[in-house]
Image (spheres, grey):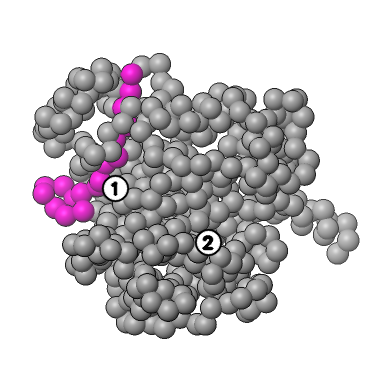
Amino acid sequence: MDTFATWIRDNRISEVECLVPDMNGVIRGKVWPASKFVDSVRNDSLRMPSSVFAVTVTGEYADEESNEESFSDPDVSLHPDAATLCVAPGFKTPTAFVFADAYHKGGGGPYETSPRFVLKKVLEFYTEMGWRMELAPELEFYLTQVNTDPDLPLLPPAGRSGRAETAPQPYGLEAVTEYEDLIEDIYEYAETASLHLDTMIHEAGTAQLEINFNHGDPVHVCDQVFLFKRIVRQVALKHGVYATFMAKPMENQPGSAMHQHISAVDIKTGRNLFADGRGREGLSKVFRHFVGGLQTLLPEVAPLFAPNVNSFRRMRPTHSAPINLQWGYDNRSCGLRVPITDAASTRVENRVPGADANPYLAAAASLVCGYIGVRDRIEPAPMVDGNAYRHPRTLPRNLDEALDRLLKCRPVIELLGEDFIRAFHRIKADELNAYEGVISSWERDHLLLKV
């Protein structure tokens, strides 16, 4: 309590936004006057309806008719995480952000379907082994013209030159300079919010950018990803454009990914557990088993890192996105890339998650699959040289198939929990049902007067 009161006083904060990530990676929460927030933390009276963890991306509630609790909609108790306190940039009133974890009321345990808790639960498995997992995401996104009509395709915005990009500009410095003012504001806002950003580059798509985060504790890094998305959207609107983290926002452009660089450290010694320094590869047995778990189980839990209908439009050969979980050294056609580096930096890059994924659930998916691989000593397939797209597809082709496979993946369900998987599946099934009721422009274009 003293930590909250002191920090708020020292930073002259007037309002506090309590942030609660929902299943889809949408930030829910409440705004309190700073003094009221401090009193509420002291009295354990921060509350929110538990139904926030049952909201679909369309804003509906995916309630289960047989579940009486879904009708009574009891509150959960919010426990703010003091380590996440930061100044909220861009507000006229001095405001702070703080992430909160949801708990059952009356001193109960964590709310099982909270994405932040699901990731913490997976990390506990590693702590029990004496491991500390580290994560460094690479997040891609597009800038687009303001688009208020969902029937119209998205278009790249004009840059400082007054012209919009018309061709790919991967790593183009002049292309980045076109959006220099916007990018400078992103970095300024990010610094205010204490985000630990690394480099920003121009990606292959028109007006597509990528930001790299410094490696760190997975929960902390996922918090940073959440704040970064919110900051980028705010800055983009300030500059009269949109920023989108859709996995595939434009038909003829590459998709946007959220690549995950994952490493493991011995808690006692600080040694990288994925390297043994012996042989040509220098990869440890536990690293191979970790990769084996990813190869075997990630295709079965795809909705956790590809949660939307649009997510699967990104996963197509020659579209800068993997279709399988082959692995190889410095091979970006593989779903699992092993960067060439020194022993201390040995890691695997999981290239399958999309930018639209909930970062907590995407991280939990990778880490739980890797954990099962280590636990069960799953051997990976041989490494791939050359084009991994020549190998059979192992990832689902659509959300319908992916949801079916998720419900059958018992090893992961047993660790993440039946309640969480059931709640997540219910939300995604409702969204899929809503999508399947929509008639697309493609259908009107090609079928209306021809069939």
Residue at x 39%, y 37% (from the top left corner) = 195
- The quadrant of the image that shows the C terminus is bottom right
- The quadrant of the image that shows the N terminus is top left
Pointer 1: what residue? 50
Horizontal side, residue 248 vs residue 279: left or right: right
Give residue 330's position: percent from left, percent from top.
56, 65
* Nearest the eye: 382 or 234: 382
The label number, if any, that marks residue 351 in the structure image: 2
Q: Residues within 10 Å of mark 2 (few under 14, many from 20)?
A: many
Q: Amino acid at mark 1?
A: Ser
- Dividing the picture into quadrants, the one containing residue 147 is top right
Cα separation, mark 2 vs mark 1, equals 33 Å
Q: Amino acid at mark 2?
A: Arg
The label number, if any, that marks residue 78 in the structure image: none
Can you say whether 416 is above or below 39 in the image? below
For mark 2, give the secondary structure: loop
* Residue 225 counted in the magenta span: no
Residue positioned most to the right:
450
Where does the magenta region start and end?
94-110
Give residue 132's position: percent from left, percent from top.
27, 60
Give residue 98's position: percent from left, percent from top.
29, 35
